[in-house]
Image (spheres, grey):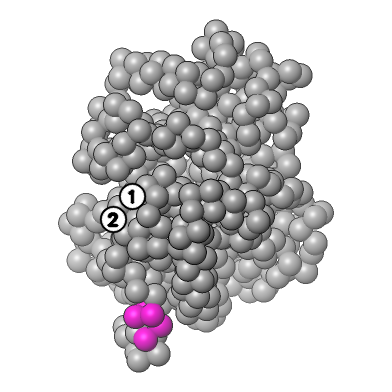
Amino acid sequence: MQNISIVGAGVGGLTTGIYLQSEGYQVTIYEKNDHPGGKMDTIQADGFKFDTGPTIVMMPDIYKKPFADTGVNYEDYFTMIRVNPFMDVWTDGEKIPLSSDLADIAKVFEAQGETEMLGFLKYLTDIYGKYINAKNNFIYQSFRGPRDFFNLKTLWHAYQLKTFSSSYAAIKKNISSTNLQYLMSFQTLYIGISPFNGPSIYNIIPMIELIYGVWFIKGGMFQYAKALEKRFIELGGQIVYQAEVQEIAVSDQKHVTGLKINEEFKTADAVVANADFPYTMTNLLGVADKAKGKYKQEKIEKMDYSMSCFLLYLGVDKKYDELRLHTIKMASDFEKNVADIDHGILPEDPSFYVYNPSVIDDTFAPDNQSALYVLVPVANLKENNNWDKEQIDLFAEKIIAKVENELALEGLSRHIVYKNIYTPKTFESRYNSAFGSTFGLKPTLKQSNYFRPHNKHAKIDNLYFAGASVHPGAGVPIVITSGELAAREVMKDN
C-alpha cells in the first residue's frame, strides 16, 4: 500500500484524497488551519453564518462526481436546490433577472429587438459547440509532455476553439446592445479575469449558467467541504489539522521523500500539493532553484495573477426579502472599472456582488435578520499593496453606502450588528495565495491548458499538484476536476 501525503485540505486536496483512498492508497492530508475547505471557508459569529469564498454553484454533476465515483449517493452528504431566477443584474439603471428558463431569458433579449434574440441564439450555438470541445479534449485531459498537446488531433481541437479574441469581443459580434453585452460577459470575473482581455472560451460560463442552471447547497458552501471531508475519512483517510507544512523534501533534486511539518519529518511515497502552486514552488519545494524545472523563482514572479476581492460580511438585524440570492450591480462605466483593477487602481465607481443566503436558508441568521456577503473585485497585491486600516475602513464605508443606495436597501448601514472584512492581504496570509490573488494564476491563453502548470511535476518524479493555479484552472467545479486529475496522475505512476 502506497503512502501518499497531500498538502492542504482544500477542495482539490480533498477530492484527490477521496479518489486515491478509494483505490487502496493510504492517504494523509496535512492542513495548516483547523478545518477543511481552503478558500471554501466559513465565519460563524454572533448568531450569523457566512460563506467566505465561493457562493455560486454551477455544473452540479461535478460536485456530485467524487461521491458517485466512489459508490455513494451524494444526497447522503449534502443537499442541492436549484435556484431560478438565480440572479438580478443591475446595469444602466435597469434590473434584469437572469433565469435558466430559456423562455424567460429570451424575453430579455427580444425586448431589445429580434436581431438581439437572433444574436443570442447564435452565441448559444457557437459557444455550446466550443464547450463540448473543451470538455472532451482539454478540461478532463492531463498534459505531461509536449506530445500530449502538440499533436495534430489536439492542435486541431485547439484551433476550433478560436480563443484569440476576448470574451467581450466575441459577444459583441453577435449582440449589439451594450447592456446585453455586459450581461453576457461579466461572468469571466468569476475566475478573476477581465472580459475585455480574457480569452473568448470563457463565454462558456454564462452559457453554463443559462443552460444547466445555478444551484444552492443547503447550509452553505462550507457544507460541501464538510461533505468531502466526511467521505474521505469514511474511506479510511486521515486529516491532520493545524499542521503547517514547512518543506516538501526532495532527494537528489528529483524524488520527494516526505514532508517537514511543525519541525517533524513525515515520509511519503508521493506528495500532492494542494497549496497554491506559486506558493508551493517558492516556499515549500526543498530543491535548488535550477532543479525546479520551468517554474523557477524568476518565472513565478513574472507570471500573471488573477484579480483579488474586497469582501464584507455583514450581520444585519433586518431581513431583505426583496434582495435575490445573488445580485450583481455593474459600474456605470464597466469597462473603465475593470481596466482600473488591471492597472492596480482602486475603483471610484466599482461593480459589486451581493449574496443573500438568508432569503433561501434560515440557518445563516437569527429570525428576521440577514447575513449579507458583499464582494468587490479589486487588484491583487502585485498591482496594489495599499491596504492599511484607514484605506480598509474608508473603502468599507463607501461600499456599504453604495449597496444601501444603489440596491435601495433601506437603513442598511444602521442595521449592521456584525461586520468582518477580507482584503487581498487576507487571502495571502490565510490561504497562502500568491499576491493575494483570489483565483490563482490568471487564465490567460499563455497560462491555460498545456501552458498552465501541470498536475505532475516535469522533473520530480513523485510530486503532483491540484488547485486553482494548475490545470484545468479556477472555479469550484474545475478545482474538483483538478483534484481528480492529480489522483489519476498518481495512479498512472503507481
Screen quadrant of the N terminus: bottom right
What's under tag 1, amino acid-wise?
A: Ser
Q: Residue, x 24% and y 56% (percent of image)? A: 303
Q: Write down the region rendered in magenta.
A: 156-160
Instruction: Please tell me whether mark 2 sits on a helix, a strand or a loop.
Output: loop
**Residue 121 in view in this figure:** yes
Provide the residue designation for mark 1. Answer: 194
Closer to the camera in the image, 314 or 21: 314
Q: Residue, x 48% and y 53% (percent of image)? A: 113
Label 2 Cα crowd, 10 Å radius (few <14 / some 14-19 / many 20+): some
Q: Residue furthest top?
A: 414
Closer to the camera in the image, 206 or 356: 206
Q: Compared with residue 389, is residue 440 higher up or lower down, i.e. above or below?
A: below
Q: Are marks 2 and 1 in contact (CB under 8 Å)?
A: yes
Q: Compared with residue 410, is residue 376 higher up or lower down, i.e. above or below?
A: below
Q: Residue, x 76% and y 19% (percent of image)? A: 367
Closer to the camera in the image, 110 or 320: 110
The residues bearing labels 2 and 1 have C-alpha atoms spaced at a distance of 6 Å
Provide the residue designation for mark 2. Answer: 197
Q: Is residue 307 magenta?
A: no
Q: Position of residue 84 (x, y in %)?
A: 68, 47
Closer to the camera in the image, 13 or 320: 320
Q: Magenta region, mostly helix, strand or loop?
A: helix
What's under tag 2, amino acid-wise?
A: Asn
Screen quadrant of the C terminus: bottom right
